[in-house]
């Protein structure tokens, strides 16, 4: 069974239990495609968090103002806009991971 069989079922499964309990069920399933999707989601989440942390460090850290503005796209990129105080870190990571 491939990943394509999982897609129609996802809306149903996202309503069952907590994310932790769903993760435990997926880990127990002998379904290679489910494990692959789980690893891909973990990798995307990890990469998104690293990008966010790097951008946040550039915006908050000491350094040349012109170097920071060049490296963060003159403040016009999506991550810089999301780093404004009105957003929480979890909301930013979720938003970036789903784009």
Image: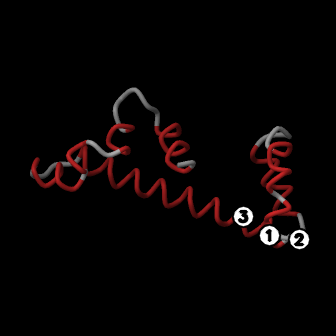
Q: Which residue matches tag 2?
A: 1
Q: To which quarter of the image does residue 33 belong?
A: bottom right
Between 97 and 22, the one lying in front of the other is 97
Q: Which of the labelled discs sits on residue 67, or is there none?
A: none
Determine whether label 2 and label 1 are within 8 Å by CB.
yes
Q: To which quarter of the image does residue 80 belong?
A: top left
Crowding at label 2, few (<14), some or many (≥20) Cα neighbours within 10 Å? few
Looking at the image, what colour scheme do you see?
secondary structure
Query: Left of 25 or right of it: where is 75?
Result: left
Measured Cα–Cα span from mark 1 to mark 3: 6 Å
In the image, residue 14 lies at what x, y percent?
79, 43
Front tag of 2 and 1: 2
Between 43 and 60, the one lying in front of the other is 43
Q: Earlier in the sequence, mark 2 or mark 1?
A: 2
Q: Is residue 19 above or below residue 49?
A: above
Determine whether label 1 and label 3 are within 8 Å by CB.
yes
> Residue at image x 79%, y 55%?
7
Mark 2: secondary structure: loop
Quadrant of the rendering where the N terminus is positioned: bottom right
> Residue at image x 84%, y 46%?
13
Q: Which residue matches tag 1?
A: 33
Between 7 and 59, the one lying in front of the other is 7
Mark 3: secondary structure: helix
Front tag of 3 and 2: 2
In the image, residue 44 lies at what x, y percent?
56, 60
Query: Left of 89 or right of it: where is 69?
Result: left
Q: Which residue matches tag 3?
A: 37
């Amino acid at each position: 069974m491939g990943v394509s069989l999982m897609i129609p079922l996802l809306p149903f499964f996202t309503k069952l239990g907590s994310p932790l309990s769903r993760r435990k069920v997926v880990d127990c399933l002998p379904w290679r495609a489910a494990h692959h999707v789980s690893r891909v989601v973990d990798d995307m989440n990890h990469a998104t968090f690293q990008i966010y942390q790097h951008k946040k460090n550039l915006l908050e850290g000491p350094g040349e103002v012109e170097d920071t503005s060049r490296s963060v796209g003159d403040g016009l990129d999506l991550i810089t806009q999301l780093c404004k105080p009105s957003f929480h870190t979890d909301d930013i990571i979720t938003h970036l991971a789903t784009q």
